[in-house]
Image (cartoon, grey):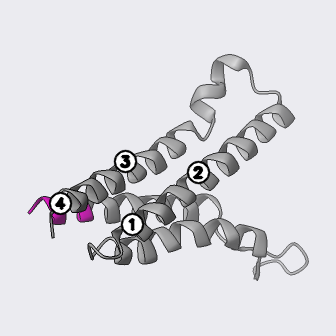
Amino acid sequence: MKKYSLLSALFILAVAGLMLHLRIHFFMVPDKMNLGSTIFDSTRFLSFIFPLVDVVVVTLLFLSRKTAAYGYLLNGLIVIYGTIFMAHFSLAEMAAKSIPLSQMLLKSTLPDIGISWADFFVGKALYDYYLKGGS
């Protein structure tokens, strides 16, 4: 039963991250040349790929004890890259907009980074479960 609870938590956190990315970085943006139409933005699409891989591939890899190590590795890579990207873009935007230091914490991507690290630690707990003989 513990396995399914952890898998569910891993999946829900990944879906929440995907939905958050879609809300903030939707890859179909309004076309400035043609009002009322949208165009594909490849840079925003890349920010959609990481959480999509997390939802689909990482969850599938964690379904089996044999592939859980790969899921753990891929989950960790996604979290590390996501942390670096989110922190970089958040700090760059705050510096460009001259946001006061007192507001930086709430307007940063720190809560988003927290969600991704929670996803990682749920994956670690699931990996540890498999290491201890869970099936």
Q: Nearer the viewer, residue 88 or 128?
A: 128
Q: Earlier in the sequence, mark 2 or mark 4?
A: 4
Marking on residue 80: 2
**Residue 66: percent from left, percent from top:** 30, 76
| Residue at 71%, 19% in the rendered image | 101
Q: Is residue 44 left or right of residue 72?
A: right
Q: Residues within 10 Å of mark 2 (few under 14, many from 20)?
A: some
* Magenta stretch prevailing secondary structure: helix
Q: Report helix, strand or loop for mark 2.
A: helix
The answer to whether marks 1 and 3 mark residues whose Cβ atoms lie closer than 8 Å is no
Picture layout, residue 130 above or below residue 61: above
**Element under label 4?**
helix
**Amino acid type indicated by mark 2:** Ile
Marks 4 & 3, CB-CB < 8 Å contact: no
What range of the chain is rendered magenta?
A: 1-8
For residue 69, the mark is: 1
Which residue lies under the disc numbered 4?
Answer: 5
Which labelled disc corresponds to residue 125?
Answer: none
Label 3 crowding class (10 Å Cα cut-off): few <14, some 14-19, many 20+?
Answer: some
Percent position of residue 122, x then y? 32, 52
Q: Amino acid at mark 3?
A: Phe
Question: Could you classify mark 1 by the number of other residues whose Cα lies within 10 Å: few (under 14), some (14-19), or many (20 or more)?
Answer: some
Q: Give the spatial CA distance, label 1 vs label 4.
A: 18 Å
Contact check, label 1 and label 2, Cβ < 8 Å: no
Residue at image mark 3: 121
